[in-house]
Image (cartoon, rainbow, N blue to C red):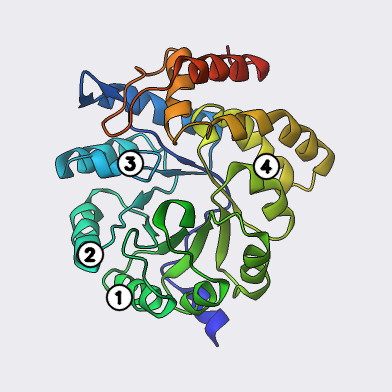
Amino acid sequence: MYMNLKICSMNKINLTGCGTALITPFKDGEVDYEAFAALVDRQVEAGIDFLVPLGTTGETPCLEDDERIKVLQVAKEHSGGLPVVVGGGTNSLQHTIRSMKMLEPYGVDAFLIVVPYYNKPTQEGQYQYFKAVAESTDKPIVLYNVPGRTGANMTAETALRLAEIDNIVAIKEASGNREQIMQILKGAPEGFQVLSGNDDDTLWMMQNGGAGIISVASNVAPALLAEFTDAIRDGQMDKAEEMNARLIPLFNNCFVESNPIPAKAALAAMGLIRNELRLPLVPSQQSTYDLMVETIKQIGLL
């Protein structure tokens, strides 16, 4: 009965392949919407499958409400019809619902909602929070588990319990705990999509039934990431293994400093944005900038 509900649901959304957790470019302290539009165009032209603005990589905690709306509008206008999955989570139920209601009219196809950070909710607290979030909207909800940033892990049991709610349709799993992720993959109901939140787990997760990746590295190399995930989906495992080996330095080096610092350094080196962030984040150390230059040279982007 439940599976039929998932298949027939109006909330169904296809999030297979590679989605990009978009950076937010700045220029002289302001959001550089022109550069952002060009970045989205580059993603679409490269064959990326869906777009994820206003997440961690987008420095969303440092954006004002009007900036968040405009970023979403630009992403939607330049999306080429690709699904737009919008970060809307906070560590307060009221603030999260208010944020979602504010953004919903501007082109949201689904919401990416992070496990509440700092206040370290129990598993029952997480369940009740996400249940209330899901009940507040008819949009699809993607759970986001990233305990390294939030301080609280969502267990496989809680994720699978939440997967029974009709408009909770996917999880971005960035715990790095493969045993936990395998539990979700094995227990997920039909139609519930499990996405990697770590670029370096993409191959393993998709080989074991994962739907795809919400990627940081695809900001830098969207065409390569699209080709990589396409190869996995098509069963071209020799090609996928070769591309994974080629891309691992990029995957790893995007996190030698706090995300999105290295990715922004790479994009600045490519002349696509200014190397500018908002406090408390600051531009990369020179050693990181040099490392990213070498990394993108190795994969033929510079």
Badge 2 crowding class, 10 Å Cα cut-off, few under 14, some 14 to 19, many 20 or more, is many
Question: How far from the left and from the top, in percent, is residue 22?
Answer: 41, 37
| Residue 71 in the figure: left or right of residue 227 | left
- Disc 4: CA contacts within 10 A as few (<14), some (14-19) or many (>=20): many
Pointer 4 or 2: first along the chain: 2
Dot 3: few (<14), some (14–19), or many (≥20) neighbours within 10 Å? many
Residue 116 seen: yes
Amino acid type of the residue that numbered disc 1 sits on in the rendered structure: Ala
Nearer to me, 49 or 213: 213
Q: Earlier in the sequence, mark 3 or mark 4?
A: 3
Q: Name the mark on residue 230.
A: 4
Query: Going by the image, does 206 lie left or right of 85?
Result: right
| Mark linked to residue 97 | 2
What is the spatial separation of the Cα atoms under label 4 and label 1, in whole angstroms? 35 Å
CB-based contact (under 8 Å), mark 4 and mark 1? no
Mark 4–mark 2 distance (CA, rounded to whole Å): 35 Å
- Label 3–label 1 contact, CB within 8 A: no
Q: From the viewer's perspective, is the residue at label 3 or at label 2 nearer?
A: 2
User: Mark 2 falls on what kind of element?
Assistant: helix
Instruction: Tell me, yes or no, if residue 146 can be seen here.
Output: no
**Quadrant in the picture for residue 173:** bottom right
Which residue appears farthest toward the bottom when viewing the image?
A: 1
Q: Position of residue 25 (x, y in %)?
A: 32, 26
Asked whether the residues under the numbered discs 2 and 1 touch, taking CB atoms below 8 Å apart as contact, a structural biologist would say yes
Q: CA distance from mark 3 to mark 2?
A: 21 Å
Residue 90 drawn above or below residue 11:
above
Q: Which residue is mark 3?
A: 76
Disc 1: which residue: 132
Q: Is residue 1 above or below residue 234?
A: below
